């Protein structure tokens, strides 16, 4: 329970700690004596134990993240680039615009037609985003990296969009999966690089039809026809970590993975309050308006790295 403490003398050297609440996050402080830096971790799958550091050595060092250095040494009065919080606020505003009834002339010409999302607007919004120092600490710290699998967490979800942050240790990949027919995905690689594979449709779904390398700083649109096909993403490096931001529309909260035993669904954890967002539709100072963005989206989209 909150604000309680306990003492454990583990003579066996084997124990397990878990959060019993399925909805609320938990934060705990552990003090060890004598100190230790790593231990044997026993995967829940029953696989052989693996020696893992208590603090992930795979997280990028602060010195290697240019946006943190720029934020710390930015002259006072200079407007910072949009943060993830700004991106989520802009997506909420865009979703509110999409929910508005169409103009009378459009309603007569195409009754019941829903407003379509221009992919270039999301590319432009995502392309200008830089994670703030607070967001690096709360979304991509050493605690957010796993030695066993890529860590993926939702940080925003509304009726039109969801935003996910992925932390990749060296060599990690996401198994073949599909995001659902008609769903669009945009990806920005903020650290390291990724490899994207589009798999074949039909009986031979495991065959790779297309490979794309997504370098650091790239912004990609993974939508259209390939959204109905199996796909795979992986850290392109065996020695360095990677961090990526993903935007989905319609919102995605669950992956469908393909395994030897068939399809398996897995929910994506939600980091509630990770960005301390305000009410939907509110926009922090500096957050670009989707309407303002639309005017310049065409020119910006031409310069982006886009996978179609």
Image: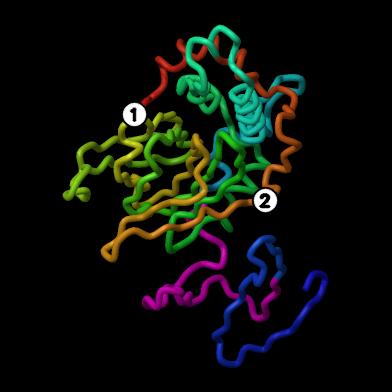
Position above or below: 45 against 193: below
**Residue placed at 54% from the left, 47% from the top?**
61
Dividing the picture into quadrants, the one containing residue 21 is bottom right
Magenta part of the chain: 30-59
Q: Which residue is mark 1?
A: 307
**Residue placed at 48% from the left, 41% from the top?**
244
Q: Earlier in the sequence, mark 2 or mark 1?
A: 2
> Does the magenta portion include 40?
yes
Residue 80 image position (x, y, % from top left): 67, 25
**Residue placed at 17% from the left, 49% from the top?**
204
Position above or below: 196 against 221: below
Residue 272 badge: 2
Q: How is the model colour-coded?
A: rainbow
Residue 138 in the figure: left or right of residue 262: right
Residue 209 image position (x, y, % from top left): 20, 39
Residue 184 image position (x, y, % from top left): 43, 33
Position above or below: 134 against 73: below
Residue that extends furthest to the bottom in the rendered view of this protein? 11
Q: Check disc 2: other Cα within 10 Å, few if <14, some if 14-19, many if 20+.
A: some
Q: Secondary structure at mark 2?
A: loop
- Depth check: 155 or 22 in front? 22
Report how far apart the C-alphas of labels 2 and 1 lie in the structure: 31 Å
Dividing the picture into quadrants, the one containing residue 103 is top right
């Amino acid at each position: 329970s909150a604000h309680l403490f306990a003492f454990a003398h583990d003579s066996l050297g084997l124990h397990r700690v878990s959060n019993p609440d399925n909805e609320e996050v938990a934060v705990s402080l552990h003090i060890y004596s004598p100190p230790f830096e790593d231990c044997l971790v026993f995967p829940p799958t029953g696989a052989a134990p693996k020696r893992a550091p208590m603090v992930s050595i795979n997280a990028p060092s602060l010195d290697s993240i240019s946006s943190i250095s720029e934020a710390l040494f930015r002259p006072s009065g200079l407007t910072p680039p949009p943060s993830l919080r700004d991106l989520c606020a802009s997506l909420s505003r865009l979703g509110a615009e999409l929910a508005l009834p169409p103009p009378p002339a459009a309603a007569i010409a195409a009754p019941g037609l829903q407003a379509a999302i221009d992919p270039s607007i999301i590319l432009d919004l995502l392309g200008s985003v830089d994670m703030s120092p607070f967001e690096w600490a709360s979304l991509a710290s050493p605690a957010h990296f796993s030695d066993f699998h890529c860590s993926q967490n939702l940080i925003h979800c509304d009726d039109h969009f969801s935003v996910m942050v992925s932390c990749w240790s060296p060599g990690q990949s996401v198994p073949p999966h599909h995001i659902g027919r008609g769903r669009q995905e945009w990806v920005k690689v903020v650290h390291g690089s990724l490899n994207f594979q589009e798999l074949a449709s039909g009986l031979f779904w495991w065959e790779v039809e297309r490979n794309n390398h997504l370098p650091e700083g790239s912004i990609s649109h993974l939508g259209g026809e390939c959204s109905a096909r199996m796909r795979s993403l992986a850290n392109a490096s065996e020695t360095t970590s990677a961090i990526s931001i993903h935007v989905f529309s319609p919102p995605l909260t669950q992956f469908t993975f393909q395994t030897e035993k068939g399809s398996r669904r897995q929910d994506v954890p939600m980091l509630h309050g990770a960005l301390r967002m305000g009410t939907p539709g509110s926009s922090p100072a500096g957050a670009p308006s989707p309407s303002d963005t639309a005017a310049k989206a065409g020119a910006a989209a031409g310069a982006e790295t886009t996978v179609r």
